[in-house]
Amino acid sequence: MNTQRAHSSEFRLLVTPLVLFLLVFLGFPAIVNLIYSISDVSFETLRQPRITGLSNFAAVWNDSAFWQASWFSLRFGVLTALLECGLGLFLAIFLSPLIERRSWLMAILMLPLMVAPALVGLMYRLVLHEFAGPVPYYLWAWFGASFSFLGPTSAFWTLIVVETLQWTPFALLLFYMAYRAIPTEIVEASAMDGARRWHLLWFIELPLMAPTIVVALLIRFIDGFRVFDNVYVLTGSGPGGSTASLSIYIYEAFFKQGAIGKAVAASVILFAVSFAVLYGLNLIASRRKGAVK
Amino acid sequence: MGTISLRQAGKQYGAVEIIKDLDMEIADGEFVVIVGPSGCGKSTLLRMIAGLEQTTSGQILIDGRDMTAASPVERKLAMVFQSYALYPHMTVRQNMGFGLKLARLSAGKIKAKVDAAADRLKLTPLLDRYPKELSGGQRQRVAIGRAIVREPVGFLFDEPLSNLDAALRVDMRLEIAKLHRTLGATMIYVTHDQVEAMTLADRIVVLKDGRVMQHGSPHELYQNPANLFVAQFIGSPKMNVLPCQRNGDGMLDLSGEGIVDLALSSSAAPVHLGARPEHLSLVAPESGHCRGTVEAREYLGGTTSVFVRNPKLGLINVSAPAETQFGIGETIGVRIDNSRLSLFDNTGTAVRTLR
Amino acid sequence: MINALRWLIFAIAALGMNFPILVTLATSFKSARELSTNPGLWVQAPTLDNYFAVFQVSDRLNIFLYLFNSITVAFIGTTLAVVLALPAAYAIARGKLGERTLLPFIVNLRAVPLIIFAIPLYMMFQWLALLDTRLGLGLILSIVNLPLALVILVNAIRDLPAELDEAALMDGASRAQILLSVIAPVCRPAIVTSLIFGFITAWNEFLFGLMLTTSKAVPITVGASFFFAASGGGVQWGVASAVMVVGALPPILLGLIMYRQISGSMTAGAVKG
């Protein structure tokens, strides 16, 4: 009969649908994942998994392809995050005077964000095609030589460029917003203090944008790390598994090799690591906030 | 009817006590202003009465019925918020009728009640406008209108004028006072502005740190503050407080700077003398109760505030005639009207004088 | 002078980042004959033949089905996410319910590789007969859309003054009534933003479409790749380009129309989340 308690029960009713939905569509799969990861299971024995212990984890642990995929994802995530944020930061600050007065310029730069990564991957199959693609065509026409963009040595870097070109606009947009949000009084105050353009950038603008830069790096790393769509349609996992990301590794273990146990064990590892890292970051962030207070 | 009683009402957030065992009786039709410095708990108290804030101990009775745990709407009170809190997506008419609609009144009845309230508040031409198309004063009137249409047993105002500019604030103050006269409803009004409190209230409740320091009519609080806090909070400009002690003759000794001729009862031991600036006057140095040098003057049009510095008594604010001639640095005497002063002991509680 | 340099850099960036889109657009207007001699960016004899070919239904390829599937699953995935997120966002923002548990969990969901849930979901869908259905894919897409929708809505509600809720409480509204007749209308811009954003995300989703559909519920992102599967004499690049243009156009148009709202919410989801 307490008003406050009545309120909180009303609120509880309002979150219930979401919580139930999550329990069914994420909680249940998570439990299935855990059970299957320690079971001997195949498509024939889906309903009667036999608990066998950690052999699936051992199989993943001893699979060189797993480590190769992890290394790919890690490198891919780090490199694309750095390139996208570096390029995005430069463009945001350098082009800011243009965009400020003509916001449609930003719309043009944001266009790649609207296109499905899978479609962009497919588009690059055309762009880089040795007969039909304009890039090899112009390389032949201008330099009399081209090379195999999706060959063993270059496929990784081609993918890096593809990912970077599509997602730099994301970093650019975040940085542009953060840059425009710097109070003009601060810029004017630093000008009164005799700051030059470089001083202003280095001592005022970049430090004020630092939180956004960290967030953008993090988001872009995460998206790069879990990459699937564009890599899958562009190279599959080849050549020779050299471009399999962790997501592709799990997908192929399940759908192509039928190795359910291995795929699920790899999922559980990825799940545990992702949440550990994410909660760790949340914790650091909230400590920081606490320290500032 | 609209009596509101608080019995030992209290509010705790964790270990922090916002309101402490508060007793209050509000009669039907009374206009009570709760006033106090920011953080004193006055808004919390109002929201406890409204039912927006949980009362953690004690009771709240409305018309004699225990409403401590009742929902806001069951209490049949209406509230006017500081930010007006008009629904931005509804017209003035919809804003005023929303509560009636929730109470499932027929459309015809809602229209009649809204029209009547709009007429009373001169809102009729604005009924189809949206809040963003209204001025601050108009929004304020809509917020009041929204409260009126529900014919509540009492009105609660949470600093309703603080978002208005000074001129409008005076107009709205008069309008609220008129509304109270015509409706005759119980009103509880929270403000930090003691001028609003003085001008509107039948009774003022001064709150500090969740406790009632004093309650009474504006006149009572002004003339006979129960303690140092109320003395300094009520009245503008602020009351001067001078250190003093009782001397052997039962007179008041102003820290050796002068003697105030006053018969004190045998048990009284005042240590603070409170004197309002308007009860002090400037005289020749030798004929005052104490003397000092003029440190600053503020010309206010009707009067001039003269700030006199005495090394032992501190800075004394004297309300002098506007055209007073004393210049900065001049030594002058200050005369205390000994029939109008207040005395306080070392706990800050008022000491009764024998007049 | 410096401005000329800015324009130059802008042109290079715009061209470079949109290069695959421009190439695809140009190629989609080229005849098969022109393609074999002119892979460049210029179209000599524009033709719509590729588009006619794309909209030709065969037993193997049916673009109308793919588009219809994409629209349906995006619609389910978007509205369901908002319908679930709005009341939860209200409870989180105003009731402080799950502010330290549910909210960070769902926000983190945005960063988790979704493949980790894909396998059990695949098996679950098999049991529930949801494989290769629009409803099944739509349900999953709502999970994909939930984090951003929740963050956008929580932020929008937090920005509203609490006195608005309290005024409605004084007017006798229940929490559900406040949500429906005060909060939802006032938050309409944020709701529209999360709907549009969700629609684009759902339309562009590929992984779950690839795994959970095979023929009846195939979305356009997956269906487009079918056009690449060689039908005898290698990929018909003109037709493949046309299908990609068709598949990319709806989110691009939506994005261009609403890009102000979208850019705002992107920063909201990223920075405040």
Image (cartoon, rainbow, N blue to C red):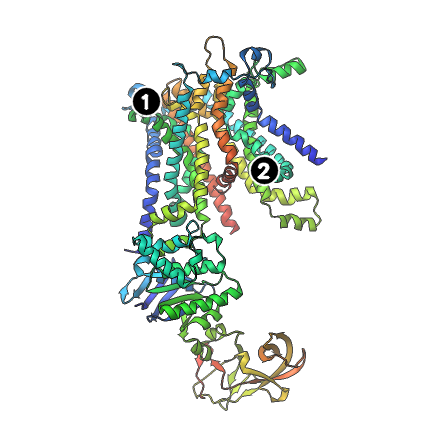
Name which residue type carries label 2. Ser
The image shows residue C117, relative to residue B312, as above or below, that is: above
Q: Secondary structure at mark 2?
A: loop
Percent from the top left, x then y, of residue C86? 39, 42
B238 relative to A31 in the view: left or right: right
Is C129 or A284 nearer to us in this picture?
A: C129
Q: Secondary structure at mark 1?
A: strand
Label 1 environment density (alpha carbons within 10 Å; few <14, some 14–19, many ≥20): many
Percent from the top left, x then y, of residue A205? 62, 43
Tell me the residue at 49%/10% (across/down).
C234
Task: Please state the chain letter of the residue tagged with numbered disc 2 in the rendered image.
Answer: A
Name which residue type carries label 1. Asp
Is A159 or B188 nearer to us in this picture?
A: B188
Q: Which residue is mark 2?
A: A103
Tell me the residue at 33%/46% (across/down).
A12
Image quadrant assignment for residue C113: top left
Percent from the top left, x then y, of residue C17? 58, 27
Is A34 or C223 nearer to us in this picture?
A: C223
Q: Which residue is mark 1?
A: A40
The image shows residue B203, relative to residue C24, as above or below, that is: below
